[in-house]
Image (cartoon, rainbow, N blue to C red):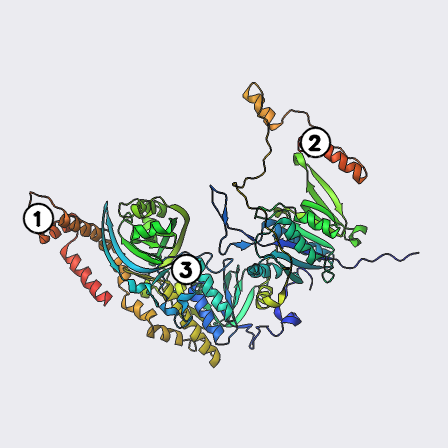
Amino acid sequence: MKPGEEVSPEESPSTAESSPVGAGGAEVDAIVVGAGPAGSAAALELARNGHSVVLLERGPFPGSKNMYGGVIYGRILDALVPKWWEEAPIQRWVTRRQTMMLSGDQALTIDYRSDRWGDPPYNGATAYRPDFDHWLADKAAEAGAHLVCSTTATGLIHEGDQVVGVTTDRPGGELRAKVVIACDGANSFLAREAGLYENLDPANFTVGVKETIALPPEVINARFGVRGDHGVDIKILGCTGGVPGGGFVYTNRDTVSVGLVLSLTGLAKGDRRPEQLLHRMKHHPGIAPLVEGGEVREYSAHMIPEGGYDAMPELVGNGLLVAGDAASMCLAAGVWLEGVNFAIGSGAAAGRAGHRAIQRGDTSAAGLAGYRTRLESSFVLSDHRKLREIPHLVMGDLAQTRLPGMACGVAEQFFHVDNPAPKPGLRRIIRSEMKANGVRMRDLVRESVKAIRGFG
Amino acid sequence: MSSPRTFAPPVVAACIKWVDLRPELDPVQGSLAPSLHGGGFSAADLSAAETALSLAQAWSGSAVLVCAGPANADRSLLDVAASGFSRTVRVDVPGQLATATVAELLVRTLGQTDLDVDLVVCGDMSYDRSSGAVPAMLAHHLDFCQALGLLSVQPMSGELAEKHTILATRRLDGARRERIKIPIPAVISVEGGIATLRRAGLHASMGEAARAEARVETRGGHIHGQSDPPRTTPWRPRARSLAGPSGESSFDRILELTGSLSDTSPPRTVKADPAEAARMIIESLSEWGYLGNDD
C-alpha cells in the first residue's frame, strides 16, 4: 500500500474475512449515528444479533461532547448489561431526592431519602457522561460494532424514497446500509433531512447550563447529609430570573453539579444570559452553602428537547429510525427529569426493530414499524403519552414564578413566630400569599386539575 | 561506462508518542493527574506522521508508524494508522519512563531488520514535559545523521531525488533560518505547525478499527525501564537570567530590551571540518552567553 491511498477493507487480502460488505449494495447491515446512550444501545442490540454495525461518533471518543443532565436510572440496562452496576462508571447512588422551591431569599424543600436506593439494583445514579457513554459504547464495540470516532454524518443517501446510507465528513465518506438509526442528538439533522420533523418549534427546546464544582468528598457528605457512595438529586423550581425553566444540584464523588435548564424562547425574549442566571442561583441562600469554597472545574451547555410527546417527530422512515434526543425522547415533567433511560430504552427498541426488519429483508417504513409498537408498549412512549401535558404545565407562568413565591411565602408566615401577636390561621395565610403573588383561585384549581390528570 | 546506481524505495518511519492531552495540573504542587479519556498525540507528532507519509509518497516508498505508548493507545493509534501507513508497531511503554529508556525501546524496534527503516521522522516535542531528546538519541543509537526542529521538509528534485535527499529549513537564533540538505539514513524532528495530518478515509478507518489486534504489532517490554526521578518542587520551564535594562530613560530601556538600533553580528558562512565546526559553535555560544563557564 502506498501512502495517501485510501484502503477499503475489501482491497486488503488480510482483511477480506472481516469485510463488512453485504449483499444488495449495503456495505453493512446498520449504521448508527451517534455513540450516546441511544446509539450505543441500538448498536449493542444489533451487534449481539449478529449484524454488522457501524457506530459513528462525531467526537474523538464517545461522550466527549456530552454533558450530564440528569440522574441515570439504570434499570433499563438490566436486559442489556446484566449486573451493570458492578462495572458502570457511577459517581454516587442517589438515596436522597429533594424538590426545592426558591423565591427571593427563601427556599422551601421537600426531602425524601431511602437507604434502600443505595443497594442493588439501585434506583438512580449520578455519573459523568464522558465516562458513562464511553463505557456503554465499549460494550457495543465488544459485541462487534465498529466504532468510528471523529466522524460526522453529514447527510443521508437516498435511493428513491428509501434511505440507504449516510455521507460523512471523511474522504470517501459514503457508507451504505440496510438500516440507518439516527441517534444524533437534539435538533437531529438526519431526522430533519428525512422530513420526519414536521415543524421544529424552538419553544420545545431548552438550553441546559451546568457548572461542575470540585469539593472534597467528606465536605460533600457533610453538606448534603450522605455517607459513602450515596448521593443527592435536587430539582429546583424558581430562581430562573423570570425565564421559564428550572434548576438542579447533583452530587458526584468529589464534585457537585449545579445547573439550570432554561427555555430558549424565554432566553431570547429576556435580556439575560444563562451564565448570569446560574451565577445568581449559586448565590441564593438556599444553594450558596452547598457549593461555597468549591473550585469550578467545568462549565458546559447543551440543548435539550423538552417538548415531550407532542414534539416528537415521525419515528420511522423508509430505512430510517430515530431514537434518543434526536426523537425528543427526553422526559421533562417537573419532578421527573429523565433522559438517559429514555434514550437507552428507545435505542434498544430501535436496535431490536432493525434486527427484525433486516431478518425479514424489509427495511421500508412498514418493515420497521415494529419500532413504534415496541415503544408504545414500553415505558418510553407510555410515560411520554401519559405525561404529555406536564411539560407545558411546568413551563407555565404559574408554576415558574407565582407558585414558588406563594409556597415560600406561606411557609414563611406559617413557621414565623410573631409573639405577642397570635398565630394567623392557615387559610388567611394562603389567601394573603395568593393575593401577594397574583395567584387566582380559578387558575390554581385549573392547573391543579391538569396536574392531577397529567400525573395520572 | 558504469550503469547508474539505483536506490531502493525507502522506508520512512513516523515515530510518535502517546501522551495525555488533558492532564489535570495542580497549580500549587505542579503535580499532574492523568485524565481518563484524554490520551492522544501532540501536534508535533501528528505533523511528523504527515511528513513521513508525504515523503514516502513522493519517493514511492512505504511509511510505517512506530508509537511508544500503553495498550490503551491502540484506538488513537489506529486512527493515525488509517491515514496511509502500511505497518503499525506499538512499542509497549506502560507508564512514564525516562527519555533514555523510551529512546532505547524505540531503537530496538527501529533497528530491527524487518522494518529496515531509512528515515525516522519525529515530532520536536511532546506534551508530557519530555526533554525533546529522543530524536537525537535515536540518531545516535541508529548511527543516522540528524536534523532537529525543522520548519519545512520537502524531497529534493533532480539528481538528488534519486538519492532521497531532503531539503529542510531549520530555525536559528534571531529569527533567522537555514536551509539544509539531509541525506538518508537520517532522523529528523519537525515542529507541529508544518503539516496537518490528512484525514483517514471512512473505509480505511473502519478497516483499521475492525482489525485492531491484527494491525498493531506490540514490541518491547523486555527492558527494566526507569522513570525520571520524582520532582520535589513544582515544575517550571527552564529560564535564563537576564540583567535588567540599565538605560536612564524609559525610551533607552525599551531600546535596550528590544535590541533596536544596537549592533548585531552579521550572519557568516564558514566551511570547516566537523571538529573545527564544533569548536566554533561552542565558541559562539559562549560568546553569546548561552554557555556558562562550567559548560
Which residue is tagged 3? A187
Question: Rounded to the nearest whole Å, what is the CA distance between mark 1 and mark 3?
Answer: 54 Å
Residue B292 picture quarter:
top right
Total numbered labels placed on residues in the image:
3
Where in the figure is residue B144, as x and y percent of width and height? 75, 50
Q: Which chain is disc 3 placed on? A: A
The quarter in which the C terminus of chain B is drawn is top right
Residue at position x 76%, y 34% from top?
A: B280
The quarter in which the N terminus of chain B is drawn is bottom right
The kind of residue on which mark 1 rests is: Lys
Q: Is B291 above or below relative to A416?
A: above
The kind of residue on which mark 2 rests is: Ser
Q: Secondary structure at mark 2?
A: helix
On residue B286, the disc is 2
Q: Closest to the observer: B26 or A364?
A: B26
* For the residues bearing labels 2 and 3, Cβ distance under 8 angstroms: no
Q: Closest to the observer: A363 or A299?
A: A299
On residue A387, the disc is none
Residue at position x 79%, y 35% from top?
A: B270
Which residue is tagged 1? A423
Foreground mark, 1 or 3? 1
**In this image, B270 relative to A72: left or right?**
right
Residue A323 visible to the viewer: no
Q: Most extreme residue toward the right, as rendered?
A: B1
Residue B174 visible to the viewer: yes
Q: Are marks 1 and 3 on the same chain?
A: yes
Q: Is A119 above or below relative to B43?
A: below
The kind of residue on which mark 3 rests is: Asn
Question: Rounded to the nearest whole Å, what is the CA distance between mark 2 and mark 1?
Answer: 90 Å
**In this image, A398 relative to B293: left or right?**
left
Q: Secondary structure at mark 3?
A: loop
